[in-house]
Image (spheres, rainbow, N blue to C red):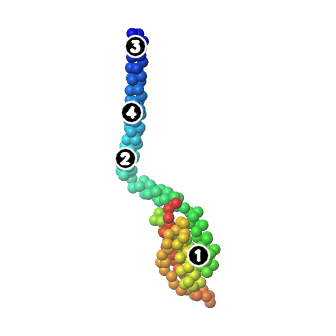
Amino acid sequence: MGWLALAFGCAASLFVFEGYRGLEDRVDALRTENRRAARAAEQARVLARRDQEDAGLRVRLELARKLSLQMGRNWQALFTDLEARGQNHAGVALLSVEPDAVRGLLRVTGEAKDLDAMFAYAESFADAHALGVPRIEVFEFKQRGNLQVVAFSLRLNWRPA
């Protein structure tokens, strides 16, 4: 009879221990869910407080956001693509490169020896990794000494990093 009581007691304690472990797992899950909800509530409070802050802070936050977007662009790929095109197109000289990382645009101005060289340069961006297909914004013929050149401006989409 004693052995039977001992076996029954062991079985009951095993049953209680399994129940305890199940409850412990449930408490851990509830704690994790509570932490997530607390983080979400804190984020909501921060956003609400930010909306109520002065205009100067909002301007500084917007500037920081734009700067963060600029830093997230792949500058190395951009310069690598532009340098490779300059080496492959000897009839084209770049005069300026104006990146707008916030809007994802890049304006390239330059001069080409003729229209064919300009179009070949523009078409070379079709396989660019960091830049999209260009759009020729403007071009005009200019006289440089005794040479006639084509001054142009291209606008390209700049892909994010």
Tell me the crowding category of disc 2: few under 14, some 14 to 19, or many 20 or more residues within 10 angstroms, Cα based.
few
* Label 4: element kind: helix
Earlier in the chain: of badge 3 and badge 1, it is 3
Residue at the (41%, 10%) spot, across then down = 2
Task: Please state which amino acid type lies under the numbered disc 2.
Answer: Ala
Q: CA distance from mark 1 to mark 4?
A: 65 Å
According to the picture, the residue beneath numbered tag 2 turns out to be 44
61 on left or right of 145? left
Earlier in the chain: of badge 1 and badge 2, it is 2
Residue at the (41%, 26%) spot, across then down = 18
According to the picture, the residue beneath numbered tag 3 turns out to be 4
Percent across and percent down for residue 39 are: 40, 42
66 on left or right of 87? left
Task: Please state which amino acid type lies under the numbered disc 4.
Answer: Arg
According to the picture, the residue beneath numbered tag 4 turns out to be 26
Res 84 label:
none
Residue at the (57%, 64%) spot, across then down = 77
**Circles 1, 4 touching at the beta carbon (< 8 Å):** no
Q: Nearer the viewer, mark 1 or mark 4?
A: 4
Q: CA distance from mark 1 to mark 2?
A: 48 Å
| On screen, residue 135 above or below 74 | below
Residue at the (47%, 63%) spot, across then down = 102
* Label 3: element kind: helix
15 on left or right of 129? left
- Residue 103 visible? The answer is yes
Q: Quadrant of the N terminus?
A: top left
According to the picture, the residue beneath numbered tag 1 turns out to be 94
| On screen, residue 109 above or below 58 | below
37 on left or right of 118? left
Foreground of the two, 33 or 78: 33
Q: Nearer the viewer, mark 4 or mark 3?
A: 3
